[in-house]
Image (tube, coloured by chain):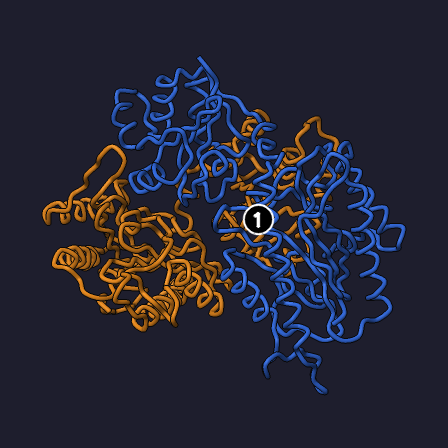
Chain colours: A blue, B orange
Amino acid sequence: MTEAYLIYASSDRDPNLFYWGNFRAPDPFLALKIDEKTIAVVSTLEYGRCKKDSTFSEVLLWSDVLQVAMDQSVKDNCCKVILHLQRAYQVSSFIIPDDFPAHLYETLRKLVPIRFDTVFFQTQRRFKSASEVEHIKTACQLTSQAILYARAILKKSRTDAIQPFLYYREKVLTSERLRSAIECYCLKKGGHCTGTIVSCSQQAADPHCEGTGPLCANEFIVIDVFPRLNQNGYYGDMTRTFLKGVASIRQKQLFACVQSCQRELIGCICPGVNTKDLMQFAQNYFEQNGFGLRKTSDVCEGFIHSVGHGLGLGLHEYPSVGTNSVVLEPNMVFTVEPGLYFRDFGGVRIEDVVQVTSTGCQLLSRCPYQWIL
Amino acid sequence: MTEAYLIYASSDRDPNLFYWGNFRAPDPFLALKIDEKTIAVVSTLEYGRCKKDSTFSEVLLWSDVLQVAMDQSVKDNCCKVILHLQRAYQVSSFIIPDDFPAHLYETLRKLVPIRFDTVFFQTQRRFKSASEVEHIKTACQLTSQAILYARAILKKSRTDAIQPFLYYREKVLTSERLRSAIECYCLKKGGHCTGTIVSCSQQAADPHCEGTGPLCANEFIVIDVFPRLNQNGYYGDMTRTFLKGVASIRQKQLFACVQSCQRELIGCICPGVNTKDLMQFAQNYFEQNGFGLRKTSDVCEGFIHSVGHGLGLGLHEYPSVGTNSVVLEPNMVFTVEPGLYFRDFGGVRIEDVVQVTSTGCQLLSRCPYQWIL
């Protein structure tokens, strides 16, 4: 008798499931992990491809399993299949992730021993292997190429005597147009983007605003690109802030503050450091420079997000570099992305990806740049 | 005292949550629905954007709620916030979807009355309003434009005396290249694609194989495009099967069988019809034409998926047109996509989107085409 980890999810959406079988499917399917063995149960639709392309140790056909599991007095088909697997693999109890579907859990918990293991599922991918680091590095190279491509468009764009807008190839350069150019660029190089941010001026005051309408001269333009590589599912993530035209003293101060904060943060990263201390460091740094968190009735301003997030098969994964406590260890990979946001002024964010090494950290993304174009 | 529907999810991934607030966020957040009122609790990162852009009746800041909820003896922050909401809105019990995170459910069920409502969450979006139908139609127009764009590339491509490959602009036309062209086309027109299928020959025998390598003459080429509109989050979905060169008699038979099956299916659709009868109809149709389901030890062949799936804010949503029983009602929207798949031969699939009307159905996607180019 043995314990089995159990996932029921779409591997397109669940990086843990993808990690087990290296197989992408849009609809949910069942998978078990017993010691080093991984077993998938899939529909006729996915069976052939899963057999051929995945790295699951075993691939079973859902309808086959259901047929032999038919004798049970359980109504729910998914439960039937799981109970059959329990017998077939002599599973003493199942271990599930926090985001396991609650309804299935509610039925199962009355039939089989089942428990959560938050830490296992949150952290099974926390140490990146050499090949994973290479994949993330490749994805980060794509982000920096895409950023430089966007920079070249901004650089070539022209301003106008009457309007504050930027013009590129005789037409107004909008967030939508630059975003579409960036995303096409990534597509052609093998990476899928969604939600690429190209936000200008006051829109950039909102870190997750994708941006809409004309890009303007003399304003911050935040570009945040996070493609997923088609070949292996790993993400890159990079943000650069540009300004076309002339920067004011306050814009320069704001930029310099974010840039130096990022440098200091990267300098602090080494094994043993606690992520919440990095968060505290950034908060203090901005506070001391006069840019602390402020909240009014309908907006938050200043440094309003966390320092960063783990990156790999998930875009936002363990460890989160925020107020939670995580002690850094070698081969953790995460973003470092301090930013400042003011409603009437816009925003600045600079984001790179680091890998913790035995003595400090190494940058997986490189894109030195001039921000004023 | 009143009941409250409760979701904890990322609205990028959960169409029900997006439906409540018309607001996309990558990280999970809490939302309640009490009668017609919807309430979101979001982080500082999303607060300003959610206040400004979403249609939630109320937007609360997570840290504010947590602060006033601090007195409770509960450890989990998310539970604390939910318990506070329970008091603040006098909630007698919470109603959750099947895919609610199990761990949060396990903590909550010991503290508050909580129950599942599979049907509500599965079906709250089942009847599409006139404006939703318009959005889906727009997305379907994009799919047909993209398909015609791909068709033009196939049409212009050339064959070669030595190799079976297609050549376009002096270079081999691969699945990757055509997919990237289609996806860039959609991007420029305001739709994001992921996983667009351009699969040729034996690869097309696997309905979810995205396709890789050179496209070949005289073979089936399956193109399945399903962009999501950036503007409103609705999906289109269309599949067409092409062949460049000369089709064999068997290829023509296979194509004709799928095409006529699709026409017959569309002709059957009207209120009162059961989806499982549509599935049975397709199975019988293919069986009678000598193309029934076959399974060997490592592959399934024939008609190996369901007839279709609901389409809207989700790519695969209610109703599934498979072996489950759903009685069709006016304003349900779903795909009709019979297909046949043979290992040594490839695959054929034709997919359109229909809206059930009071007397039958109307096609939301239109793309008449010649399949032999």
Q: Is residue A344 above or below residue B335?
A: below
Which chain is home to disc 1? A
Residue lying at the far front of the rendered structure: B162
Foreground residue among B142 and B122: B142
Residue B181, horizontal then vertical, whole percent: 43, 65
Residue A272, horizontal then vertical, whole percent: 77, 31
Is residue B361 visible in the rendered structure shown here?
yes
Q: Is residue B211 above or below residue A109?
A: below
Q: Is residue A338 above or below residue A44?
A: below
- Image quadrant occupied by the N terminus of chain B: top right
Q: Is residue B146 above or below residue B271?
A: below
Q: Determine the residue positioned at 28% across, 61% down.
A: B163
Residue A153, horizontal then vertical, whole percent: 63, 72
Left or right position of B9 against B189: right
Left or right position of A199 against A56: right
- Image quadrant occupied by the C terminus of chain B: bottom left
According to the picture, the residue beneath numbered tag 1 turns out to be: A235
**Quarter of the view holding residue B216:** bottom left
Residue A227, horizontal then vertical, whole percent: 56, 54
Amino acid type, callout 1: Tyr
Assign a secondary structure to mark 1: loop
Foreground residue among B166 and A78: B166
